[in-house]
Structure formats: C-alpha cells, structure tokens
C-alpha cells in the first residue's frame, strides 16, 4: 500500500492534497488486489479524497483484480455520497448515469448486485432510481 493509499484510507485529506501536489505522485497506483486510491476512497465514503483524486487525474475506469470499478466498491460499502460523486464525474466525462450504474465486473455483477451483497437498502433503492437493470444475471 502506498502512502497515498494510506492517507486516503485514514481520511487524512490534507495529506492526500500534499502528496498529489508533487508531480511524481501517481494517482492511479494499484495497491492490494489492484485497488486504486479512488477505490479506497469509495469503499469508506471519503468523498473529499475522492474529489481531490479526480481533480488530479485519477481514473474511474480502472478495475481491480476482481474486475470491480470504483462504483462497485462504493455500492458494496453502502457509500451513496461516493456513488453520487462518481456518477456526476462520469457524466462530466461523457458517460451516462445509466451506463455507469450498469457497469459490469468480471463476473457480470453490476453495482446493484454489489449493493444487494452489502445489504444497504438506501443504496439498492438509489441504484434502481438511477436506472440499474434489476433483471441482469451474473455469471455463476
């Protein structure tokens, strides 16, 4: 795990800013299981770090070794605020909300699948309201 991953995971957002102010800091560096700092921020609903990372070129399109995107990490964690940031940033990059809310990982799991696994009713409702396909089948 890199210092940037640690700063994000401990919600030391002032350190995230400091580290990213140095041109050599890679905002998309993969850590454990291929998780990027964006994925870590999403998994703990650290929207401040998430926003800082996105302003410094962090990608939402990176997948970890399980094939999860940041939206999957946020959905599983019940991190609705992080999901809102991701969907807004995705729209600004030209990706529709429906495209993002139905992104599939390696097992064809969508963010809705991950929200159901995480058990957060509010996030499940949020996914459905944003256009998640409720009849999509995973690969078993």
Image (cartoon, rainbow, N blue to C red):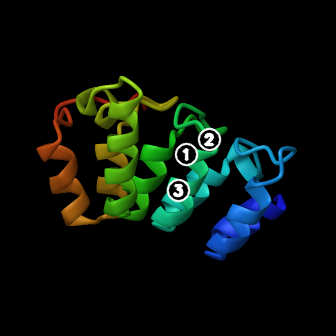
Q: Is residue 139 left or right of residue 44?
A: left
Badge 2 density bin: few <14, some 14–19, many ≥20, Cα 10 Å: some
**Quarter of the rendering containing residue 110:** top left
Please state the horizontal and vertical placement of residue 61, each as a whole percent of the image.
54, 31
**Which residue is label 3 attached to?**
50
**Which residue is label 2 attached to?**
58
Query: Residue reaching furthest right?
Result: 24
Please state the horizontal and vertical placement of residue 117, each as a whole percent of the image.
36, 56
In space, the residues marked 2 and 1 are separated at their CA atoms by: 5 Å
Q: Do the residues under discs 2 and 1 have CB atoms within 8 angstroms?
A: yes
Where the N terminus falls, by quadrant?
bottom right
Q: Callout 3: helix, strand or loop?
A: helix
Please state the horizontal and vertical placement of residue 15, each as a whole percent of the image.
73, 71
Q: Callout 1: helix, strand or loop?
A: helix
Vertically, is 19 above or below 55? below
**Which residue is label 1 attached to?**
54
Q: Do the residues under discs 3 and 1 have CB atoms within 8 angstroms?
A: yes
Q: Closest to the observer: 113 or 2?
A: 2
Q: Residue at x 48, y 32 (%)?
A: 105
Q: Closest to the observer: 43 or 67?
A: 43
Please state the horizontal and vertical placement of residue 135, each as a whole percent of the image.
17, 31
Where the C terminus falls, by quadrant?
top left
In space, the residues marked 2 and 3 are separated at their CA atoms by: 9 Å
The earlier-in-sequence mark between 2 and 3 is 3
Q: Residue at x 74, y 54 (%)?
A: 20
Q: Closest to the observer: 57 or 133?
A: 57
């Amino acid at each position: 795990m890199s210092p940037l991953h640690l700063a994000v995971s401990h919600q030391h957002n002032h350190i995230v800013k400091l580290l990213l102010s140095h041109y050599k800091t890679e905002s998309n560096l993969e850590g454990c299981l291929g998780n990027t700092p964006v994925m870590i921020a999403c998994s703990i609903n650290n929207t401040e770090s998430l926003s800082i990372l996105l302003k410094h070129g962090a990608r939402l399109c990176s997948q970890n070794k399980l094939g999860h995107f940041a939206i999957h990490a946020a959905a599983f964690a019940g991190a609705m605020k992080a999901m809102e940031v991701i969907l807004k940033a995705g729209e600004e990059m030209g990706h529709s909300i429906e495209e993002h809310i139905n992104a599939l990982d390696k097992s064809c799991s969508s963010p809705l699948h991950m929200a159901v696994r995480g058990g957060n009713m509010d996030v499940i409702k949020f996914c459905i309201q944003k256009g998640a396909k409720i009849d999509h089948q995973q690969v078993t």
